[in-house]
Amino acid sequence: MRKVIELTVGRLTTLALVLALGTGLAGLGGCAAGKALGPVAMEPLPLERAAPAALERNHFQRDRSGSITEEGLREVLAAPVFLEPNARVGVIQVASGYEPDAGLPVVDVPAGLTEALEKSGMFEVATEVSSDWPADSGVSGLRELAARYRVEYLLLYRHRFVDETWTNGWGWMYMLVLPAFFVPSQTTETAGVMEATLFDVKTGTILYTVFERVKARDEFNVWHNEQKLRGMQEKLMRDTADALSRAVVSKTRFLVASRPRPEAARPAPAVAAPAPEPPVVTPAEPAPAEPVPSES
């Protein structure tokens, strides 16, 4: 009898634990269902971020050594770039390293550039500069020549060519010896760059540089190829001189348009008109009271 009672109590205890556990799970499910049915509050996503600050300082230590200090570099870059009014310009041909070219000025490109600048009306005087005057080499010599000509700007012109020559299909004529001296067995190719740079003499800065790239190829015999090559290059320069002059005038016009306007030409700042004063309303005087007739 005792064993039956213990067995019954154990089963009742197990049943009670199962019922309690089921009741708890049902309660949790009901709470979860109730929360799912209600409104969900979510914070907005941070889609917009603050823009990072612009980088203005050079953090590379090895870049700071040179002929210009950090303060000077910042002063030059912060200054406005424009062409001064009533200025004079000189046009000079320079050699490698921007030294005055001591050779004879047989190239007529500087003359065309000078004429184009003079006709543009953007300079008071445009003149070619002779490099025969005694002057130092390099940039210091250019500034000395500019001082002699009393010009504020120098337009530096130079050209550079690279050449290549090879034997073409006519080379088989070399077997016939005599005809080989007359057939066009040599192919010559030349490629060059024509450059014009506007140099500000007072500040030592460069306002712009214009390049015109040229290229030509021809076939020659073995006679006087150096003269023929020089003739090819001179023809390229003559044919491209007008394009270079147009590019120079166009760039200079941008500098003229960048001039700061004088104070007199600047529009006066807009001033808000004062608000109109409300009209003064004078109260009307009361009408005199009419006499009341007395009763007799």
Image (cartoon, grey):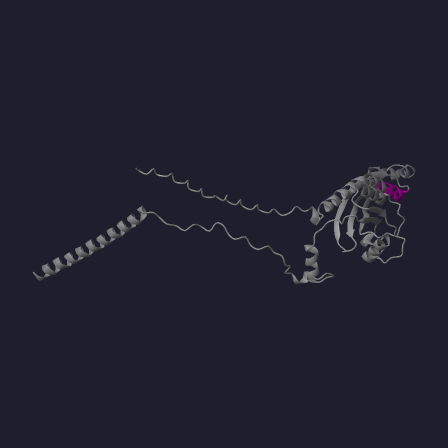
Front in this rendered view, residue 161 or 152: 152
Query: Magenta span has 231?
Result: yes
Instruction: Give the quarter of the image for residue 177.
Output: top right
Question: Outermost residue toward the front?
Answer: 296
Q: Position of residue 27 (x, y in %)?
A: 24, 52
Q: Report the magenta residues as a range.
A: 224-232
Q: Position of residue 249 (x, y in %)?
A: 77, 43
Relative to 156, say whether 238 is above or below. above
Relative to 261, say whether 239 is above or below. above
Query: Magenta span has 219?
Result: no
Residue at 24% of width from left, 54% of height from top?
24
Instruction: Give the quarter of the image for residue 292.
Output: top left
Front in this rendered view, residue 293 or 83: 293
Q: Position of residue 230 (x, y in %)?
A: 87, 43
Instruction: Give the quarter of the image for residue 99.
Output: bottom right
**Does any portion of residue 264 appear in the rendered image?**
yes
Number of dots carrying numbers: 0
